[in-house]
């Protein structure tokens, strides 16, 4: 029996108050204090000793503007996420090294590695001058640890060797710090342990990553008004290309470059709903293999890919539409030129007649069933959702395989 594909995402929409009130209206939180017309009711703005407008608070703060000309975000301003702090710990945790897979289509793996990214809002702040990476371990079976990392601009692939208890310093400048209103840092770290036997795969390693203030904050441009002149729909256009295959198994590590809206097109602040049309075609499919291909998505605040909520799936469907209910902290930075949202196609390989899953286990070579996939994705952003928002879902542990 053929089943229909239903791709309707269940994510709660919460709409922030992002307007400007007149002087005689009460504030949004219900007290009776007057609203300073300079700040339009947004109390995370202030003026520094030089008379420069400064936005404080968190990178997750809503960057949308109301378009009436009095919103402080519509003027050039600095972004100060430091407050009175001169250093901020972004990562402080215990990590148990485990298996890491190498390459896109190979099942070869190494022991004793782990990846470290930042949490939501834990970005390398504008004004950062240096960043330190500290690791500490006590298990004698761990004989060494190295790491590679990616900043906003460059992937640094030459391993840096760490000594237990000794911090390594990385210089940061205006170009390698994250943009203001970035939800999840572009910085990421991959650690590789060395050790005897299998012990390195289990010994916990304590990692601390800290940023230090040292550069002057720059005057950033006003937040663009993406919904000016009554605009309620933004057609972000379509992108086409060829996607390398994934492993197609739950053990696979997806290292593919994501599908994104074209450069210059972002999911702008103020978006409530994103509509995604997609189509795909497997190139030169293997005989006797059925390719079940599903879309994945991630927002600007999370590196984990998710399946749209799927009720019944027709494996033969090669096109579809799904919707993402967008919360304010999921949108791109208004200063971004390349969206941090990402989309992929996940493939499950099955025997064509029986539908039995096909896996490649234990081999070091490429998956013999894997094929490139031609794709087309078309994105449309809506200022106001025309769909009813579902009940809240907890996505923290709902990660794609």
Image (cartoon, rainbow, N blue to C red):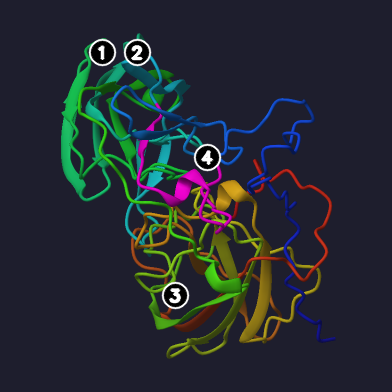
Is there a contact, CB below 8 Å, between mark 1 and mark 3? no
Mark closer to the observer (2, 4): 4
* Precedes in sequence: disc 4 or disc 3: 4
Name the residue that disc number 3 marks: 370
* Precedes in sequence: disc 1 or disc 3: 1
Name the residue that disc number 4 marks: 60
Circle on res. 104? none
Q: Hey, which quadrant is residue 66 in on the image?
A: bottom right
* Precedes in sequence: disc 1 or disc 4: 4
Residue 384: x percent and y percent?
Answer: 70, 66
Spatial CA span between label 1 and label 4: 34 Å
Provide the residue span drawn in magenta.
Answer: 61-81
Is there a contact, CB below 8 Å, between mark 2 and mark 4? no
Name the residue that disc number 2 marks: 137
Q: Hey, which quadrant is residue 275 in on the image?
A: bottom right
Q: Would you say residue 327 is visible in this rendering?
A: yes
Compared to residue 333, the image places residue 249 above or below, namely below
Is there a contact, CB below 8 Å, between mark 1 and mark 4? no
What type of secondary structure mainly makes up the magenta span? loop
């Amino acid at each position: 029996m053929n089943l229909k594909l239903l791709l309707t995402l269940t994510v709660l929409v919460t709409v922030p108050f992002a307007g400007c009130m007149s002087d005689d209206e009460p504030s949004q939180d219900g007290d009776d204090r007057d609203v300073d017309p300079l700040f339009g009711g947004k109390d995370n703005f202030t003026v520094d000793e030089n008379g420069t407008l400064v936005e404080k608070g968190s990178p997750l703060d809503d960057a949308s503007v109301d378009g009436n000309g009095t919103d402080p975000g519509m003027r050039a301003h600095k972004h100060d996420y430091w407050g009175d702090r001169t250093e901020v710990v972004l990562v402080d945790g215990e990590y148990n090294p485990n298996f890491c897979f190498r390459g896109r289509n190979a099942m070869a793996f190494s022991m004793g590695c782990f990846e470290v990214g930042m949490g939501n809002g834990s970005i390398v702040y504008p004004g950062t001058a240096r960043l330190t990476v500290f690791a500490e371990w006590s298990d004698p079976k761990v004989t060494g640890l190295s790491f590679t990392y990616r900043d906003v601009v460059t992937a640094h692939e030459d391993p840096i060797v760490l000594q237990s208890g000794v911090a390594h310093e990385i210089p940061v400048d205006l170009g390698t710090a994250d943009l203001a209103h970035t939800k999840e840092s572009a910085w990421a770290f991959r650690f590789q342990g060395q050790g005897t036997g299998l012990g390195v795969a289990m010994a916990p390693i304590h990692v601390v990553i800290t940023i230090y203030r040292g550069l002057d904050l720059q005057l950033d441009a006003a937040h663009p008004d993406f919904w000016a002149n009554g605009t309620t729909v933004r057609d972000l256009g379509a992108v086409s290309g060829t996607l390398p295959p994934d492993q197609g198994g739950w053990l696979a590590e997806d290292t593919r470059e994501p599908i994104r809206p074209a450069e210059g097109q972002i999911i702008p602040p103020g978006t409530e709903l994103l509509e995604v049309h997609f189509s795909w075609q497997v190139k030169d499919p293997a005989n006797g293999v059925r390719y079940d291909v599903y879309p994945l998505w991630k927002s600007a605040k999370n590196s984990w890919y998710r399946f749209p909520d799927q009720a019944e799936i027709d494996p033969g469907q090669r096109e579809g539409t799904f919707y993402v209910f967008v919360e304010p902290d999921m949108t791109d930075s208004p200063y971004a030129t390349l969206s941090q949202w990402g989309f992929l196609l996940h493939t499950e390989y099955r025997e064509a007649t029986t539908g039995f899953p096909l896996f490649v286990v234990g081999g070091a070579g490429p998956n013999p069933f894997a094929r490139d996939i031609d794709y087309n994705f078309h994105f449309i952003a809506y200022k106001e959702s025309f769909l009813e928002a579902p009940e809240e879902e907890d996505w923290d542990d709902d990660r794609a395989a």
